[in-house]
Amino acid sequence: MNLKVNLTIAGQALNGYLNIDPLANPKDEDKIATDISNIDSFVDHNSAELLLALDVLDFFPLQVRQSVLINYMCKIAHGGSLIVGGLDIREIGRALFYQNLDLRREANLHLFGPCDHVMRSKKSLITMDDTVEMIMNPGQFEIQSKKFDGMHYLVEAKRN
């Protein structure tokens, strides 16, 4: 159980990880360029010690977000960890209300992403609490930590 998986969209490859990125250059030996909504072809069920999905779930439509997350959760071995993160829509709303975001640049970037590629256009934003509820719903994971860094959240869960 030493498999570590890093799912990213135009992000950094991590040493010692299986890096999967739909926007990776096919010639890049550090990343596998493929769809990350279903990683069955690359990661077996119950095989990953750690799976990182930081800032990727926001780029999936709300209707498929939970099924994508469930696909990731199935890959975690018993005792392994899942770490997911994203932007919290409640925190974005709070920042807008208190005028802590520039409406022209920052707000649009947070709400919609860079939009320089179809996969880098955000399709859904939810709260950290909603993400925790999705992880807890099957009852196989225990939340280890929940953290905020500004509007970004990070949830770490361990599979029982």
Image: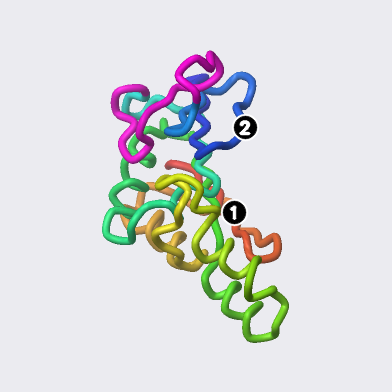
Q: Residue furthest bottom?
A: 97
Mark 2 surroundings within 10 Å by alpha-carbon count, few (fewer than 14), some (14 through 19), many (20 or more): some
Numbered badge on residue 12: 2
Name the one closer to the observer, 130 or 102: 102
For the magenta stretch, what is the residue range? 25-42
Q: Nearer the viewer, mark 1 or mark 2?
A: 2
Q: Secondary structure at mark 1?
A: strand
Q: Position of residue 58 (x, y in %)?
A: 45, 55
Residue 27 in the magenta stretch? The answer is yes
- Snapshot quadrant of residue 22: top left
The residue lying at 69 percent from left, 85 percent from top is 98
Q: Is residue 70 above or below residue 88?
A: above
Q: Is residue 34 above or below residue 113?
A: above
Q: Position of residue 40 (x, y in %)?
A: 29, 28
Q: Is residue 70 left or right of residue 21?
A: left
Q: What's under tag 2, amino acid-wise?
A: Gln
Q: Is residue 146 left or right of residue 100?
A: left
Name the one closer to the observer, 50 or 57: 57
Residue 18 in the magenta stretch? The answer is no
Q: Is residue 97 above or below residue 134?
A: below
Mark 1 surroundings within 10 Å by alpha-carbon count, few (fewer than 14), some (14 through 19), many (20 or more): many
Q: Is residue 98 left or right of residue 57?
A: right
Secondary structure mostly seen in magenta is: loop
Q: Which residue is mark 1?
A: 154
Q: Secondary structure at mark 2?
A: loop
- Snapshot quadrant of residue 152: bottom right
